[in-house]
Image (cartoon, helix red, strand yellow):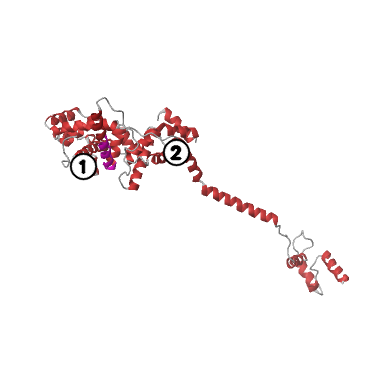
Amino acid sequence: MSGDDSGALPLGHDLSPADESQSLADGRVDEWIHAMNRERCLHVFSLLVDGRPVPAAVEHAARQFALGDEDCAVALEDYRTLHELLASEPGVQASPGFATRVVAARTDEGAAVLPFVRRLALAAALALAVTVGWALATPQELMADGSLEADVHTVDHFRSSPYQTDDLTGGITSLLTDPDPFDRELVRPAQREAVAGEGADR
Amino acid sequence: MRDEDAALVARLRAGEEDAFHEFVELYQDRIITVVARVSGSMADAEDLAQETFLKAFRAIERFAGNSALFTWLYRIAVNTARDFLDHRRRRPSVPLDDGLVEPASDADGPDRDLERSELRQRVRAAVARLPEPFRTTLVLREMEGNTYEEIAQILGVSIGTVESRIFRARRKLRTLLERTHA
């Protein structure tokens, strides 16, 4: 490497985004031809090294400029050397079993993606199973208590049969004409008989 | 999209285990190489490459086929390596040349070999010191051999920006080499 042009032009990381986008692709061909300088000359050579298309007039202007600027020729030679060195850099090879490890990691990742959903579903299934099991193991009696039964039978006095509509008028009339309305039968005949039987035993 | 790419993408989307294996084996060396060069860390290269492939597997449904499959994968790899650099916010701690094999020497003799080997070491060190956007662009061009159009696609920038970055990366690299030589 030779020639020192550091400081002559801003380095890459010092450039603003606007500076960065300046290139021949922006269509400033005339400006490049008529105001060729070292930076533009080197830029053109950088494109030529990579086989990029450069307008013939711009290439000619760059070559003409390089004839009078020794550093351009030196820089071009340096670019070629760097290109050769970098292009011949050896690549890196994967270690044995790399592909297998990646595919296994993908499988593990797939398994890890749904743990929450799986756990939630498992918890819901367990809760349902416990609820159903508990309900089946402890059946509840579906009988009303005594007071409710009494109420039901009180209501029954207002209808001629359990399958017919209430006869409120008839029921009330019956109560009014009953000499002892508070001694109505509020229990079924079978229960009454059972109670009577218990009394006889005593 | 190329026919081979289309067939492989279809198999990947179908979840074929063999397709995943084939996909990784097809590109593993190039992906490990590019993430090592962009990140500047040989020690993390395989982890970054694995992350790249896993990201690709997850995103394969969204691969539109506007670019070659490898260009798409390359873009994921470069972004993964750049994210790694952003996360660590520091220069590579493990020299890039660790684990790299020197290319076979030419017939110019041992002195010439030594000189060239030293220059190669200096170039590697200088590349590692380049600012990130310039290092990545130069790596993709000079070391990976991508075209300007491919680089523009991979980095999501214009051709003009690629041209400019490569030129400025070369200038900067040359300056760094002159400083280290001095």
Could you tell me if residue B139 is visible in this image?
A: yes
Q: Is residue B175 left or right of residue B22?
A: left
Q: Residue at x 64, y 55 (%)?
A: A131
Q: Residue extending furthest front?
A: B110
Residue wearing tag 2: B57
Tag 2's secondary structure?
A: helix
Residue A12, image x and y in percent? 23, 41
Magenta range:
B120-132
Callout 2 amino acid: Phe
Residue B41 sits in quarter = top left
Disc nearest the viewer among 1 and 2: 1
Foreground residue among A149 and B18: B18
Callout 1 amino acid: Leu
Q: Residue extending furthest right?
A: A200
Foreground residue among A119 and A5: A5
Give neighbour class at mark 1: few <14, some 14-19, many 20+ (Cα, 10 Å): some
Residue B14, image x and y in percent? 49, 35
Residue wearing tag 1: A11
Q: Residue at x 45, y 35 (%)?
A: A97
